[in-house]
Image (tube, rainbow, N blue to C red):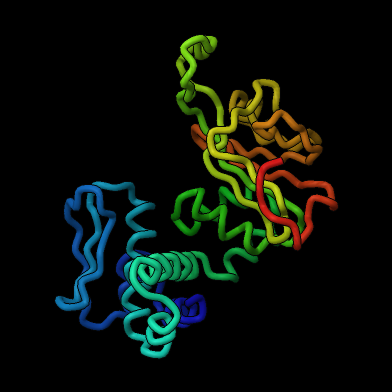
Amino acid sequence: MKALAATYAADLPGLDTHSLMHGLNGVQLSFLPMGDRDGAFDPEHSVILINSRVRPERQRFTLAHEISHALLLGDDDLLSDLHDAFEGDRLEQVIETLCNVGAAALLMPDDLIAGMLARFGPTGRALGELARRADVSASTALYALAEHTEAPVLYAVCALTRPETDDPDDSPPPPGGKVLTVRVSGGAPGVKYSLRPGTPVPDDHPVAVALDTRLPIVQDSYVPFRSGRRMPAQVDAFPDRQRVLVSFLLPGRAAEPAAPRGEA
């Protein structure tokens, strides 16, 4: 699927909305309210539909996803292999996953990711620049960057969220009613740790300080696991609007290709 998407992208005049459609002869693009759906590809009427009421970066990824559906349907060999290997709901799940893979390959080609890593290293800044230049969400950029990172790095996107609690005896939330938490995280190949969504970031952690000061911070610190364990790491925190894009450079022993992924 990556090769299929990369081949398609190589012949495009650009990666803006209309250029992305350039290789789909006869397929129309339409934006309209679609309720809870982000988009759809209708092969019978040769049209891609995009929800006009979602964020622009989500529209962009959805468009690339639906283009991937069209590419997949046009590849008889790949489609046949999928139908031979899967069926029912599992087939639909695999197709959706492959189209997400195709969308990422369309919007974030390998040379773009390599360029970000070469210029900024495996840092929070690289994550922010990739999201901006590809015009995709930070979470989408995170997974693509992590896949191409060779160092033992754990990436995270942190933002202010309302605290979740089921205990009425918990202490009241801080002023403003929001706390800094992990929204999404992902590690380079071989990194066996992750940060669970909703994991709080301590107020004195470099990530919190970067959000408060709006200044990038690179500092030897730790990964703030929800369990309370503090794994030493070099923290690169890059504030971006109301969030912080973070890379944790882990000790070498944290990268063990054979180990399962999960929080400590």
On the picture, is 179 further left or further right than 188? left
On the picture, is 68 further left or further right than 144? left
Identity of the residue drawn at 56% across and 27% down: 180
In the rendered view, tell whether residue 196 sits above or below residue 119: above
Q: Quadrant of residue 46?
A: bottom left
Q: Position of residue 138 (x, y in %)?
A: 51, 48
The answer to whether residue 19 is seen in the rendering is: no
On the picture, is 62 further left or further right than 2? left
Quadrant into which the C terminus falls: top right
223 or 117: which is nearer to us? 223
Q: Position of residue 161 (x, y in %)?
A: 47, 28
List the single residue furthest toward the bottom: 77
Q: Quadrant of residue 220?
A: top right
In the rendered view, tell whether residue 173 sits above or below residue 74: above
121 or 235: which is nearer to us? 235
Q: Position of residue 184 (x, y in %)?
A: 54, 44
248 or 83: which is nearer to us? 83
Q: Position of residue 134 (x, y in %)?
A: 48, 59
On the picture, is 78 further left or further right than 205? left
The answer to whether residue 100 is seen in the rendering is: yes
Identity of the residue drawn at 41% across and 84% down: 84
How many labels, in total? Answer: 0
Identity of the residue drawn at 31% across and 77% down: 70
In the rendered view, tell whether residue 178 sits above or below residue 261: above
In the rendered view, tell whether residue 66 sits above or below residue 57: below
